[in-house]
Amino acid sequence: MAIDVNGNNLAIADSDGAVKIIRLPDLLVVAEFTKDKLDTPTAIALSPDGKLLAVANQRHIVFIFDLTLGSEVNSLEGHTLQINSLAFSPSGRYVISAGLDKTVRIWDVSVRQKTPKLLVGHSAGVLHAKLDSTDTLALTASADKTSRLWDVGTGQEISRLNGSDRSILLSRFTADENRILAVSEDGTIRTYAKTLNDLLKLAQQRVTRGLFCKERVQFLFEQLKCP
């Protein structure tokens, strides 16, 4: 199930492979896609403006549909195992997909791109992925018990968020995008600072004294020789 950011359209996938677009709040079915190639959908997403629909099937293909035209406009291949998560970027330019093949792929659907940006590093299946409002940072959640923050431009991991002893089911940015929320299979929700600067600001709000030398080494990773 997916809903656009304005709350105007709801997308629902059936087990028989059909995907229905339902207008809210009157619950009128305004579009339906029943192509055989969809098989059983494993993930769906609506673009922020409600004009595009992304559907992943059991053959690890992502189909892009134009809801205005009522037809498929692109198909994206590359994942080798089940696709667990699909999401459009806030700008609507990109689709980010996360799979059991331990990879995340970022597709530029504005130009119908076939070759994605690849994020590789998780040691188990990736269960969820999102992009920030600038399209420059990606956030992932994995069965390897970590959330990770990535630089989309370079494809490199920026930071790794640990703390759970079970799979991370979902990670997302807070509304102001200064912090990260991670939902774990162990029933906990953890909050992390997004960057070192954010962590320092948080520490300054809560700590009324300066850090000792050993604390600066431990928490700020400074290369100091402490007595």
Image (spheres, rainbow, N blue to C red):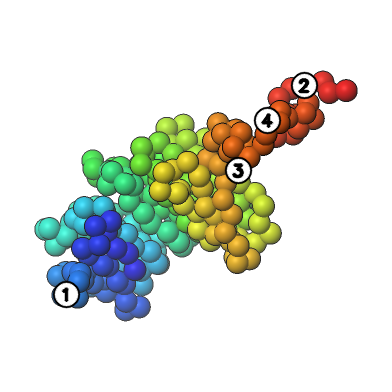
Residue located farthest toward the right when viewing the structure as drawn: 227
Circle 1 sits in a helix, a strand or a loop, which is it? loop
**Residue 26: assigned label:** 1
Estimate how packed mark 1 is, as few (under 14), some (14 to 19) or many (20 or more) residues with alpha carbons within 10 Å: few
Q: CA distance from mark 3 to mark 2?
A: 23 Å
Q: Position of residue 215 (x, y in %)?
A: 76, 32
Q: Earlier in the sequence, mark 4 or mark 3?
A: 3
* Residue behind mark 4: 220
Numbered marks: total = 4
Q: Quadrant of the C terminus?
A: top right
Estimate how packed mark 4 is, as few (under 14), some (14 to 19) or many (20 or more) residues with alpha carbons within 10 Å: few
The amino acid type of the residue labelled 2 equals Leu
**Residue 224: assigned label:** 2
The amino acid type of the residue labelled 4 equals Leu
Q: Position of residue 207 (x, y in %)?
A: 67, 36
User: Quick check: 87 above or below 214?
Assistant: below
**Residue 160: assigned label:** 3
Report whether 34 appears left or right of 155: left
User: Quick check: 217 above or below 110?
Assistant: above
Identified at 83% across, 23% down, the residue is 226
Q: Earlier in the sequence, mark 3 or mark 1?
A: 1
Circle 3 sits in a helix, a strand or a loop, which is it? strand
Q: CA distance from mark 2 to mark 1?
A: 64 Å
